[in-house]
Image (cartoon, grey):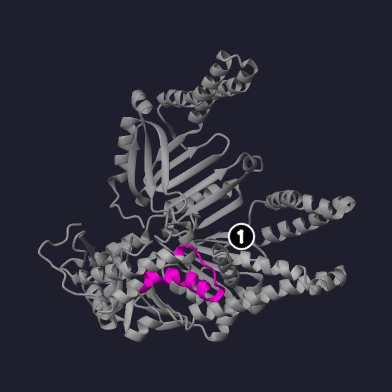
Amino acid sequence: MAPDSDFQPQQRLHPLSWLFAFLAFARQLILPAIAFLVFGTRPDGMHWGAWLLAPVLLVALWQQWFYRYGFGPRGLVIRRGLLFRSLRQIDYERIENIDTERGPLHRMFGVAQVKIHTSTGGRPEALIRVLGLAAVEEMRTRVFGAGAPAAREQAAAQHGTRLIHLAPGELVRYGLIDNRGLVVVVAAGGVLHELGLFERLSAQVHGALESSAFVELVALGPGLQVALAAAAVLGGLIVTRILSIALALITLYDFTLEARGGDLRVRHGLLTRVALTLRTSRIQAVHRTESLLHRLLGRTSLRVDLAGDAQVGNPQNAQATVRWLAPVCTPGTAPALIAAALPEVNLDVQPDWQPLAPRAGARVFKVTTAIWLLVASAPAFWLLHEWTPLALLAGVPGAWLHAHLYVKHTRWALTPDAVMFRRGWLTRALTIVPRDCVQSVRVTRSPFDRRRRMARIIIDTAGGTGGKAAIQIRHLDARAARALAAALYRTATPLRASRAARERDGSPQALWS
Amino acid sequence: MDMRQVDPATVRVWRWLTASLAIPPGIGAMVAVFTDGGPWAVLPGAVAAAALALAWVWPPLYYRHLRWRLDSTGIVIRRGVLWQSWIALPRTRIQHSDVYQGPLQRRFGVGTLKLYTAGTRHTRIELPGLAHADALKLRDALLAEDDGRGA
């Protein structure tokens, strides 16, 4: 898209932008710096890191000096650089979201980091670091005032209705359910290992092993040793859970979901305030998850897939962009939230839940038993010697129970607007995909499937995470799978495209005629 | 269901392609024979022979199981001998398309139609072995009524 040649952007960044550009780089050096100060480790990276900071500061100042943005006749124009110039135009109609992120420092100076998303999805089209709040508000009104009809609607309805707000008590529950504390511990362990902390620790441990206290521990006998080990594991579990709760309180503090002008707005964060918009027209699927812990605490989790979030070729990032509808909510409020996320799906229709193929249970049982035998044989033989066959047999009823419960809880349904799939008995998940979000349908049959007249169906949307299709159902009856696939194929015509056309033409009847 | 088959000329393309797998182990076997490593020729020789046998048997089988159909909604492809799949792609979901021809395919006048979606797991759906002219015609037919909006 060629920018309008005579338009020159005039607006500048906030005067303190260089500070945030500089800090964004310096942040990567913070952990090593702390380790250096606290533990006296001396990673090789420190020296050149410190030397890099001065040029980084100069580059940040340079970039800020020559950065201009402006509101052209057709779109937002951003000009960067002097020697290597780049001029980017983003058409107003294509701008889907203007999201802001504000850390404590941002709030101190009254500025925000702005991300501009287009329908391409995935990475933001432009990252503006940083703008004053008034400038952000001006950008919102200029972009959405001039642009897409949906955005005009949104501007008209400034005051949204609050759908859910999470009190700290709810976040504690979420922290208990979620296990991100463990992830942090593992990641911190990795960083500390890189920094050479473990060598120091192992020296200390060696010292401890030779001390008199350890000799006494050995003398305590196996029973107490096991008890001590169990206490250590339990302590570790408690620590990771506490970490998880703290993380939940910090990152999801004041989590608010609002419906505004037909779209959903999410705000959360204690230190870094995140504000983002979930366009309902981009929502490809809603996932509900209920683990055992969820059920013990009487809660469920809801998240959505957004079109373009798939981030092809970048699976690490896919994990980071979980689009929560509600990290936790009561099962009673879930239907209202799902309805808000999928306004075009009639959820009042009682789904006609269909089971898997009649012999699916037998197959799950066989596969589970085979996996059990493979995994458990070696340790069982090593630990139990002649009792091995008995121990292995003990797993068979477990496998049978798993197969029975799995098949009992796994169901699919096709409603006039959506396809639904719920699965699992320990962790129960429900996925709802609107029929007009289906990109392609595939039915595959392995030789094993064909022998038992079964098939697998893969329903692909534009918003799966981690390269996975939105819905994948194994062990379906072959005929049912083909019928489901044919039905989805026929109705995958995007209603939303026609809705967009209707909005363009301004004739509401166009969709139904 | 009247599903169409692709151009039979593609069987020869696949035969040559599969047979070319026999070249590296074949060379290995030759080297072993000529350097007096007699017994060492057996393994690469067997691999080369297996590749040649596969080149003879597999392409006609795959050809027989590869079918496609164009209808008012989009395109349906059925393929696979052991692992069979049935793929349905509505034409409104096609983002863009390629008609691809390798050197060997050009020699036999066939091409592969590649259809791209905005999907996650299957972003590219391929229909190999079409006569090149048919591939172009099919592409035009698929894109004709589409305004290019997929997601």
Chain for disc number 1: A
For the C terminus of chain A, the quadrant is: bottom left
- Taking depth in this image into account, of B134 and A428 the one nearest to the observer is A428
Residue drawn at the location 38% of the way across and 74% of the way down: A276
Residue shown at the point (64%, 62%) measured from the top left: A424
Tag 1 secondary structure = strand
State whether residue A176 is above or below residue A402. below
**Image location of residue A486, percent across then percent down:** 48, 49
- Where does the image place residue A103, in percent across and percent down from the top left? 40, 79
* Majority secondary structure in the magenta region: helix
User: As drawn, which residue projects farthest toward the right?
Assistant: A386
Is the residue marked by circle 1 packed among few (<14), some (14-19), or many (20+) residues within 10 Å? many
Locate the N terminus of chain A and report the quarter of the image it occupies. bottom left
Is residue A513 among what the camera can see?
no
Vertical arrangement, residue A398 with respect to residue A11, above or below: above
Which residue occupies the foreground of this view, A487 or A94?
A94
Tell whether A68 sits left or right of A391: left
Q: Is A365 contained in the magenta span?
A: no
- Whether residue A309 is visible to the viewer of this picture, yes or no, is yes
Residue A207 or residue A317, whichever sits in front: A207
Q: Nearer the viewer, residue A491 or A436?
A: A436
Residue that badge 1 annotates:
A411
Image point 70% across, 68% down: which residue?
A205
Residue range of the region highlighted in magenta in the rendering: A23-45
| Three-letter code, disc 1 | Arg
- Image position, residue A333 (x, y; %): 53, 79
From the viewer's perspective, tell me whether residue A85 is left or right of residue A500.
left
Taking B36 as reference, is A249 above or below it?
below
Q: Residue B34 sits in which quadrant?
A: top right
Q: Residue furthest left?
A: A6
Q: How many marks?
A: 1
* Vertical side of B86 occupied by A439: above or below: below
